[in-house]
Every structure is written in C-alpha cells, then in structure tokens.
Image (cartoon, rainbow, N blue to C red):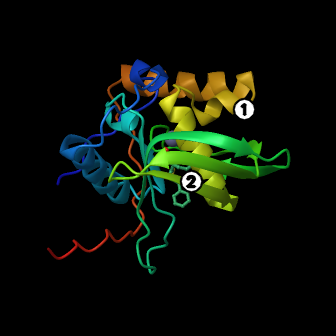
Amino acid sequence: MAAAPLVYLPDSKLRLVSAPVERVDDEVRALVATMFETMYEAAGIGLAAIQIGVARRVVTIDLAGKDEEPQPLALINPEIVKASDETQLYDEGCLSIPDYYEEVERPARVTVRYLDGDGAQQELEADGLLAVCIQHEIDHLNGVLFIDHISRLKRDRVVKKFEKARAIGELPSFPKRERRAPEPVEA
Ligand code: K1U
Ligand code: ZN
C-alpha cells in the first residue's frame, strides 16, 4: 500500500464536512491502510481522510515513538460523547499546515465512540496527547483546522503565508522525523 499525497492549506477541501461511512468494508480498510502509510511517512501522530482528499469520516492515530512498538488506532465515524470541563493547552501542529505550531486549549479528557476496522462499535477514554489528537482529527472531519482556535491575527497571517507559497508554486515540505511503520501481520 503506497502513501498518498497530502492536501495543504489553503486547499478548500480542508473545509469540507466529511460524510459518515455507511459500511466498514474492504474499500474502507484499504483507505485506512493508505492513511497509516501516509501518516508514518510524514511522521505524523494522526491523520484524517480529508488530508489525503477523501471526504469520509475516517481517522488514524499512532502516538508511539520511533523506538516503541507501533500502536495503530483507526477510528471510523468517531464522535465525542463526553468531554471534561477541565481544559489543557497543547502546542499543536498539522500535517496540512507544515512547520506551524500554536497553543490550543481543549477539554483535557474525552470519551470517543467509533467503529473499528471490523465495523464493531468501541468506546475509548482519552487524556493527554491522545485526547488532543482525537479532538484535532475530529475537527478535520468537520472542516475545522487548529488555526480556527487561535487569534484571527495569527490565523490570517498563516493563511496568507500559505496562499503566497501556493501562488509561487512552492510546495510546503514537512521535516521528516525517523518513524517506523508497523510490521505486516503474518497471514
Ligand atoms: O492531523 C494532523 O495534521 C496530524 C497532526 C496531529 C496532531 C499533532 C499535534 C497535536 C495535535 C494533533 C500531526 O501529527 S502534526 C506532527 C506533529 O506535530 C507531531 C508529530 C509527532 C509528535 C508530536 C507532534
Ligand atoms: Zn491536522
């Protein structure tokens, strides 16, 4: 399975509201595999399908470091069913907005309901970076970017920078970090 090209700011696809997955079939599992491939190649910890141009409610996440066992997590039709009043700040980044980081405040703990790769309903309680990442990815499914949570001044500045980069044909590059993809599962 090959990695797919990423969609970058200011591509209007990033503002689409993605459609729910009706049935978790081989096509959806192939999309998940392509997303993991793309996410590992870009050294990201999360990816939403729209970031490779597919407007479906599918998210991949892996928070494992480069020397740790991979912990791939695929969330299909994820929804937050509980969020804490307590919040946390995290310096967020986005594979679709390379080299730009800003602090965002979000609920510190969330409970997310989703379908797994077999179409079974699951629920997961998350805090720390996992809670941040889940909320960041679900935002993508709703056409929301982390820069929508920062000041208008900062947002306008970064959007202009990427509009200019696109106008002069300068594709953004993402600094590659060392990252190991999971070993294929033996049949
Ligand atoms: O959705 C995305 O664009 C992926 C994004 C997820 C994310 C990172 C940090 C906070 C919230 C959400 C990334 O993976 S950007 C890459 C990155 O910033 C990072 C990579 C490895 C460890 C920590 C951050
Ligand atoms: Zn992002």
The mark total stands at: 2
For image coordinates 32% across by 26% down, the residue present is: 169
For image coordinates 38% across by 24% down, the residue present is: 166
Residue 46 falls left or right of residue 22: right
Instruction: Name the residue that disc number 1 marks.
Output: 150
Q: Position of residue 53 (x, y in %)?
A: 32, 30
Which quadrant does the N terminus fall into? bottom left
The residue under label 1 is which amino acid type?
A: Ile
Q: Position of residue 11 (x, y in %)?
A: 41, 23
Residue 41 in the image: above or below residue 49: below
How crowded is the residue under tag 2: few (<14 C-alpha within 10 Å), some, or many (20+)? some
Foreground of the two, 187 or 67: 187
**First in sequence: mark 2 vs mark 1:** 2
For image coordinates 49% across by 70% down, the residue present is: 64
Secondary element at image label 1? loop
Q: Which label number is shown at residue 123?
A: 2
Residue 65 falls left or right of residue 83: left
Which quadrant does the C terminus fall into? bottom left
